[in-house]
Image (cartoon, rainbow, N blue to C red):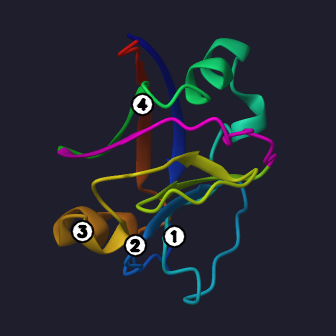
């Protein structure tokens, strides 16, 4: 297993009500229409990830885990890699329940979407000063 840690921050418009995705973005603005977004001003985007992570993500046998921590609340989302993951986005990363891939997709087949996150966890993210610690784990199953 290899891992990467980075930070994102809360925003007053975080709702986390999307039924199929979770997104973390480097953007600093957020409208209430961005209902999948759980963190803004991220210190990392998919294109910035190291080559070993990009290679691991293209293997469908790789388990990808995203741990999200704010204060003492921890949420964990598990999915897997896919040959279609290109990790091209310079601004964001999207966790998907489906198997859809594009340059913004971090993982597919996720066991959670934004709506599934603990509501107290989400309430903490509504504060712009909230720090969201993110840890990506790549676990090889091949």
Residue at mark 3: 116
- Residue 11 numbered mark, or none: 1
Image point (40%, 72%), residue name: 126
Marks 2 and 1 in Cβ contact (< 8 Å): yes
**Secondary element type, mark 4:** strand
Left or right of 52: which side holds 131?
Answer: left
Rendered location of residue 135, percent (x, y)? 42, 31
**Secondary element type, mark 3:** helix
N-term mark: 3 or 1: 1
Nearer to us in this view, 80 or 130: 80
Separation (CA) of disc 1 from disc 4:
20 Å
Between marks 3 and 2 in the image, the one whose residue lies nearer the viewer: 3
Q: Quadrant of the C terminus?
A: top left
N-term mark: 1 or 4: 1
**What's the magenta region?**
73-90
Separation (CA) of disc 2 from disc 4:
20 Å
Separation (CA) of disc 3 from disc 1:
19 Å
Residue at mark 4: 135
Work out whether 45 lies above or below 36: above
**Secondary element type, mark 1:** loop
Separation (CA) of disc 3 from disc 2:
16 Å
Residue at mark 2: 126
């Amino acid at each position: 297993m290899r891992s990467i840690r980075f930070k994102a921050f809360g925003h007053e418009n975080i709702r986390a009500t999307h039924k199929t995705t979770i997104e973390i973005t480097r953007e600093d603005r957020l409208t209430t229409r961005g209902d999948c977004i759980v963190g803004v001003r991220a210190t990392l985007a998919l294109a910035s990830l190291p080559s070993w992570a990009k290679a691991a993500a293209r293997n469908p046998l790789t388990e990808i885990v995203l741990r999200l921590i704010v204060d003492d609340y921890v949420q964990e989302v598990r999915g897997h890699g896919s040959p279609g993951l290109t990790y091209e986005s310079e601004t964001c990363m999207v966790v998907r329940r489906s198997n859809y891939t594009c340059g913004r997709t971090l993982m597919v087949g996720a066991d959670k979407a934004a709506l599934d996150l603990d509501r107290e966890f989400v309430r903490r993210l509504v504060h712009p000063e909230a720090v969201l610690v993110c840890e990506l784990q790549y676990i090889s199953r091949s």
